Image: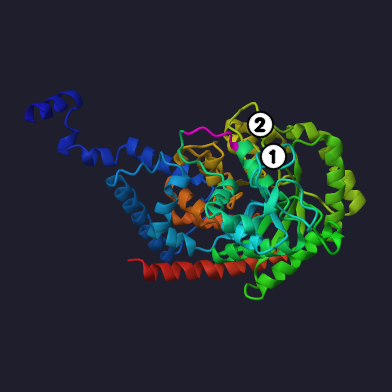
Amino acid sequence: MMRKYFTYILLFGFPLFGCQNKVAENSTYQQNWMVLEQENKALAFDADMKLSDAEITLDKKLFQMRKQLLAETDQQKISLFNSSFNQLKPLIEKSKLYEVIQSMPKGSLLHTHSGGITDVKWLITAARKYKECYVYDQADHDQFIFGQLAFFEEGKVPKGFVSLDKKLASNPGFEKELTELLILKRDALCGYTDYWIEFEKRFKRISLLLPYRPFFKEYYLKGFQDLVKDKVQHVEIRFVFDELYDFKHGKYPLKTSITDLQDVVKEIQKTQPQFGLKLIYSSFKFLDPKSIEKQLEIAFELKKEFPDMISGFDLVADEAAGNSVYSFRENWVKLNELTKKYGVKMPLFLHAGESNSVFNKNILDISTLDNPRIGHGLNLIYFPKTMELIRKQNKLVEVSPISNQILGYVSDLRNHPARVLLSNGIQCSISSDDPSVYGYEGLSYDFWVAFVYWELDVKALKKLVFNSVNYSSMNESEKKEAVKHLNTQWNDFIRKMNLELK
Ligand SMILES: [Zn+2]
C-alpha cells in the first residue's frame, strides 16, 4: 500500500498532502474555472429563471430523491440506462419520484395526435359496449388487418369481421392479444422492430373506430379526463380531420368534429373551468403538393370559421419515408396569398428532424418559415447555424422523450439530443406524442424520464412547464389567464411537496 502511495507521489507530486490548497484556491486557473462554469450556465434555456426559497428547498429534496433512486437501482443491479421505457414502467410507477411528478402541474400538452391520446384498455372496453362494433379476425390483407376495429350496420358487415363483444366473450385470451396489437412496445433496446410499420398498424386498427360520432365524443372525453387527472390544463392536438358519421344520419360535415370537441371541452370545463383545447390541422408528408394545396384550403376554411380552435397546419408521417418539407415549397410560398384570401394566418407546426440522419434537412425549412414550434427536432443539433437561428427566433422544440425511444431514435435516454438543445438555450417543452399507442396515459412518465436521465433540477422543470403555456397557441388573454392559473397551481405544488417530503 505504502509503495503504491510513494509511486503516486513520484508521478503526480504532493497534491494529496493538501499543502497547495490555499494557493490553488486563489489561482487564475480556479477563477477561470468558476467563470467558465457560470458562462456555460448562462447559455442554458432556463438561465432567466430565479427560484424562490421554497423552490430551492424542494429542489434539494428532489435531488436527493433521484440520488437515492439511482443508488437503489444500482444496488439491485437494475440497468436503468440500458433498459427500455416498457421494461422500466413498473419501476417508474412504484417510485416516490413518480408520485411527486404526477402531482406537479404540467401546463399544456403541446404535441399529441388524434388517435393517440386515449388509453387502449379503456378503448376496448368502451368499444365492445356497442353491438355494432366488430373486429377483423383474419390475417392481414390489403384492405383490413388483423385486430382492426370498426362499426357496421347489421347486414353490412364485411367478410372477416366478427362482433367484438362476442369475440372477447368467447375467447378469454383475446383481450390481451388485442391490447398488444394496439400498443407499440420496445421490449428491449437491442431487439429488432420495423418501428414505423408497426406504429402505423396501430393507428390503422382504430382508424375506422374514431369517426363514429357517438364513439368519437366518448373517446375524447376520456382522453381529456386523463390529461386533467395528470395535471394538464391545455392540450393542442395534431388533428387529422375525418367526416364523422352515424347510421341514422350518415356523414357529417368536417366541422362537426370541431363543434363536438367544443361540447366535450365544455363538459370538462364544468369541473375544470381553465381547461382548453386547440387543433393543428394535420395532413401527411406522403401526399403530393397538389393534394396539400387542397388540404391547406380546407384548413384555411375551418380556421376562418373557428379561429380560436384551429391554430395551424402540420404534415405528419415517417420522415424517412415521406416527402421532404422542402418538396412542398410551392405550398408554403402560397400561404401569404391564402392568408389574404381567408383573412386568417396559418402558422406551421411541422414535424421536422424526427430523424438521426443529416440527409434529412427538414429542420432547415423551419427557420425560414412561419413555424413557431417544431415537432421533435432530433437532428437539429447537427445543423449549428439553424440551431442558432431557431434560438434567436425564439422557436420552441416539442420534445417527446419516450416516443423517441420507442420509435428507435434514442436508446440510452441520457444521450437524448434535447439535452444539447437545452444547454444551448433552445426553448423546449415536454410532450407525450402518442401515449396510448405507447401504452400509457398522461405526461408524467415523460417528465420522469427527462428529470432522471437529463439530470434536471426544479428550475428546468419549471421552465419546461411554463414554456408549454407561453409557447402555446392560446391568444394573449387566454394565455394570461392560463399563466395565472398555472402560477397558483405551481406554488401550491411547491408548498404541498415541501410539507410532504422530508
Ligand atoms: Zn408527433
Give the magenta range.
191-195
User: Which of 410 and 454 lies nearest the eye of the viewer?
Assistant: 410
- Asked if the stretch drawn in magenta spans residue 193, the answer is yes
Instruction: Identify the residue shown where x is 60% and y is 61%.
Output: 125
Up-down relation of residue 450 to residue 118 (above or below): above
Q: Position of residue 102 (x, y in %)?
A: 48, 62
The residue lying at 58 percent from left, 56 percent from top is 170
Tell me if the residue at label 1 has its CB under 8 Å from ligand 1: no
Circle 1: residue type? Ala
- The secondary structure type at the circle numbered 2 is loop
Which numbered tag is attached to residue 480? Answer: none
Where residue 348 appears, as percent x and y from the top left, is 75, 46
Q: Amino acid at mark 2?
A: Ala
Residue wearing tag 1: 317
Left or right placement of residue 258 versus residue 181 in this view? right
Residue that mark 2 sits on: 320
- Residue 234, image x and y in percent? 64, 62
Task: Relative to 170, say whether 81 is above or below.
Answer: above
